[in-house]
Image (cartoon, grey):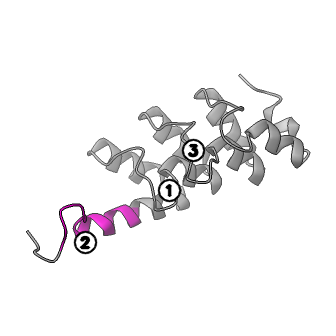
Amino acid sequence: MNDQLGPDTPAPEVVDLAHALFDLARAGDADRLAAYVDAGAPVDLTDPAGNTLLMLAAYHGHPGAVDELARRGGDVDRLNDRGQSPLAGAVFKGESEVVDVLLRHGASPDAGQPTARETAAMFGREDLLAREA
């Protein structure tokens, strides 16, 4: 054990792996993300701002990665530290395929602040939620 690390401080290689997973989520590398989660990486791993892998994949417009993470138990309604949901982020970014995947996995259009419904209304994108499950 490294004597310079406190009892709650993760080892540097763990931090490096977490950063790599966040990068994979932003890039939408569904296959590698799925492999890491299948090997034991936490599906709802969060960055310092409370964004999960699924949130990052959704916000960056990667429906395949969102689907793989949701199929492995990723929380489609988990809010980040600012109270934002993956669905509201996808609506804000106009990511219709991501919105469809999230709704198919049961994401609530009323989670978070502002909600996905409120976000859609603010930006004139009600069409994104018109196919709501």
Q: Residue at x 24, y 69 (%)?
A: 13
Between 25 and 55, the one nearer to me in the picture: 55
The crowd level at tag 3 (other Cα within 10 Å; few <14, some 14-19, many 20+) is many
Q: Return the x and y of residue 112 as percentages of the image width and height.
A: 66, 40
Which of discs 3 and 1 lies nearer the camera? The answer is 3
Q: Is residue 9 magenta?
A: yes
Q: Nearer the viewer, mark 3 or mark 2?
A: 3
According to the image, label 3 marks what residue? 79
> Gap in Å between the C-alphas at discs 3 and 2?
27 Å
Per the image, label 1 sits on a secondary structure element best described as: helix
Quadrant for residue 59, please give it.
Answer: bottom right
Instruction: Tell me the quarter of the image containing the N terminus.
Output: bottom left
**Vertical placement of residue 6 versus 60, above or below:** below
Residue interval drawn in magenta: 5-20
Q: Which residue is denoted by mark 1 in the rendering?
A: 25
Mark 3 or mark 2: which comes first in sequence?
A: 2
Residue located beneath label 2 in the image = 12
Q: Is residue 55 above or below residue 101?
A: below
- The crowd level at tag 2 (other Cα within 10 Å; few <14, some 14-19, many 20+) is few
Spatial CA span between label 2 and label 1: 20 Å
At x 31%, y 67%, the residue is 15
Between the C-alphas of marks 3 and 1, the distance is: 16 Å
Nearer the observer, disc 2 or disc 1? 2
Q: Residue furthest bottom?
A: 4
Q: Disc 3 vs disc 1: Cβ atoms closer than 8 Å?
A: no
Q: Residue at x 52, y 60 (%)?
A: 49
What percent of the width, then of the height, locates residue 78? 54, 40
Under mark 1, the amino acid is Ala
Instruction: Answer few, some or many: residues within 10 Å of disc 1's Cα (few below 14, many 20 plus, some between 14 and 19).
Output: many
Q: Amino acid at mark 2?
A: Pro
